[in-house]
Amino acid sequence: MDQSVEAMGAISARMQEAWNRGDATAFAADFAEDAEFVAFEGTVLKGRDAIVAFHQPLFDTALRGSRLVDGRVVFARVVGPDWGVVHYRVGVVMPGEDTPLPSRDSMQLLAVRWRDDGWQAVALQNSRVISMDYQLALDALASAPEG
């Protein structure tokens, strides 16, 4: 099998394709059985089955018809024997929209391990990409007195 950094980066491309089909099982297929997944809002999922169980209801309802676009590997590298990291960025287009809003830009950092003749994601942190100015504006809005 292919132990290249390109093969590591292909995990994210397959996840993107599965998301665009609304297929949580395929979305989670490259995760190890005992993988940990941190969703963008902080939910921690433990195990491939939990990743599927979390995503499929979203794909069937609120995220039905959403698409991940403009996905790109920022970097992928081997960091030790049978271990690597992948940083992936992607835009999110919601149903009825044509272009991704910058406020929905996401990045994922994956820890991958070579197991059973293939790379498997053992951990993923998914986060929104926002500027410091945007964060400060959100903080000001959250701390403003109501009324």
Image (spheres, helix red, strand yellow):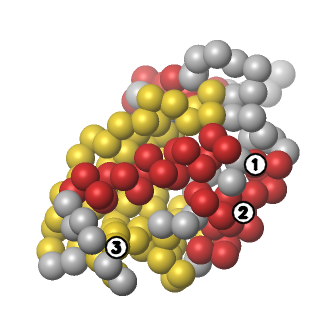
Establish if 105 lies above or below 28.
above
How dense is the environment of label 3, judged by Cα within 10 Å: few (below 14), some, or many (20 and up)? Answer: some
Name the residue type under label 2.
Phe
> Regarding mark 1 in the picture, which secondary structure is present there?
helix
Name the residue type under label 1.
Phe
Total marks shown come to 3
Q: Position of residue 82 (x, y in %)?
A: 22, 77
Nearer the observer, disc 1 or disc 2? 1
Q: Position of residue 130 (x, y in %)?
A: 46, 32
Establish if 94 lies above or below 27.
above
Determine the residue positioned at 60% across, 50% down: 18
Seen from the viewer's position, the closer of residues 113 and 137 is 113
> Regarding mark 3 in the picture, which secondary structure is present there?
strand
The furthest residue to the top:
98
Q: Which mark is residue 59?
A: 1
Q: State the quadrant of the C terminus.
A: top right
Mark 2–mark 3 distance (CA, rounded to whole Å): 25 Å
Q: Which residue is mark 2?
A: 54
Q: Are marks 1 and 2 in contact (CB under 8 Å)?
A: no
> Regarding mark 2 in the picture, which secondary structure is present there?
helix
Circle nearer the N terminus (1, 2): 2
Circle nearer the N terminus (1, 3): 1
Mark 1–mark 3 distance (CA, rounded to whole Å): 27 Å
Mark 1–mark 2 distance (CA, rounded to whole Å): 9 Å
Quick check: 70 left or right of 139?
Answer: left
Q: Which mark is residue 118?
A: 3
How dense is the environment of label 1, judged by Cα within 10 Å: few (below 14), some, or many (20 and up)? Answer: some
Circle nearer the N terminus (2, 3): 2
